[in-house]
Image (tube, rainbow, N blue to C red):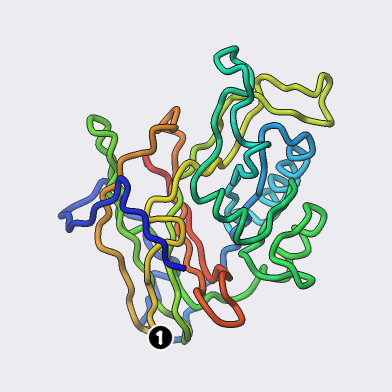
Amino acid sequence: MNKLSTLLLSMFFLAGCDYVDEPLGEEDGPDNPGVVVPRRILLEDCTGHTCNNCPEAARIAEEMKENLGDRLIIVAVHMVDGFAAPVPPLGDGEFDTDFRTAAGSEYETTFGIGSLPKGMVSRRPFENSISLGRNKWNSAAGALDGQEAALDLWFDSISYDQGTNTATLKVKAACVKPLSGNHSLTIYLLEDSIIADQLDLDAEPDHVQDYLHRHVLRDNVNGTWGQNFVVGSADVGDTLETQVISYTLAANVLDHTHCSFVAYVYSTAGTDQYEVKQAVEAKLLP
């Protein structure tokens, strides 16, 4: 299932960085087996700009964010071509934003997202399903909130060269609880605050031309399914890291100042396949 994309991706070592996000629990550090690292929850809001019920789901997600704060990371994954693709006639200024991504299309098939809005809460089954209606998101997140994570995960460095439109980044993790089974790391590129058309059943008129699209998935930095990160197992005190990744921002990005990266580690096999064990978000620019 590791379908690695080589498009716009190269790996090399880099000395120095623009800024560093420190790991949680830094004062104790991974050498202290008693350090407690909270599990951050990843909400993938499966949405589309011609889905008239999707804005209600987005509002639920924002209310959850207000309650959970940094413990919740939201990613709006536009999928199902009929809801995310531009609507003809193109060039008339209405519904001409293309929100589709290759990863979103594959997730749609893999997780059986046949209708919208749907959502995945750390891709952990809730009431026997990974794909959840918006009325179940709060309960699914509540079942995870307060759990201790096995990994402390952070962006060790992020820098951006506007001249080449290229970011360089490195992700690190410290194992604070034993972790068994193979796990992969995926990195998302998000763009926030995109002003574009949206159907909204609760608006009058229901065609909102200046809708604020939040947390939009623009691209996968290291492929749809990411890269191997934990092979076999990891023990308390183990440190994991990627090489520095050089990535040219996707062509569909409208404003790089609104961009951020989300990294998450998930299980690749077994009874917990696809479950996201830890996630972190950091801005492209400090």
Q: Within the image, what quadrant is residue 182 found in?
A: bottom left
Question: Looking at the image, how many numbered discs can be counted on the residues?
Answer: 1
Q: Is residue 6 left or right of residue 217?
A: left
Q: Give the residue drawn at x 74%, y 41%.
A: 59
Label 1 crowding class (10 Å Cα cut-off): few <14, some 14-19, many 20+?
Answer: few
Q: Depth check: 11 or 255 in front?
A: 11
Q: Give the residue drawn at x 44%, y 39%.
A: 259
Q: Depth check: 282 or 221 in front?
A: 221
Residue 264 at x, y percent in the picture: 48, 62
Q: Give the residue drawn at x 82%, y 54%.
A: 135
Q: Depth check: 274 or 19 in front?
A: 274
Question: Measured along the vertical axis of the image, is residue 59 above or below residue 118?
Answer: above
Q: Look at the image and tell me in which quarter the C terminus lies.
A: top left
Q: Depth check: 161 or 134 in front?
A: 134
Which residue is the site of mark 1? 232
Question: Measured along the vertical axis of the image, is residue 72 above or below residue 146?
Answer: above
In this view, which residue lies farthest toward the top? 92
Residue 173 at x, y percent in the picture: 38, 70
Residue 32 at x, y percent in the picture: 40, 84
Secondary structure state at the residue bearing disc 1? loop
Q: Within the image, what quadrant is residue 174 found in?
A: bottom left
Q: Give the residue drawn at x 55%, y 54%.
A: 106
**Mark 1: which amino acid?**
Gly
Q: Is residue 186 left or right of residue 115?
A: left
Q: Is residue 30 left or right of residue 193?
A: left
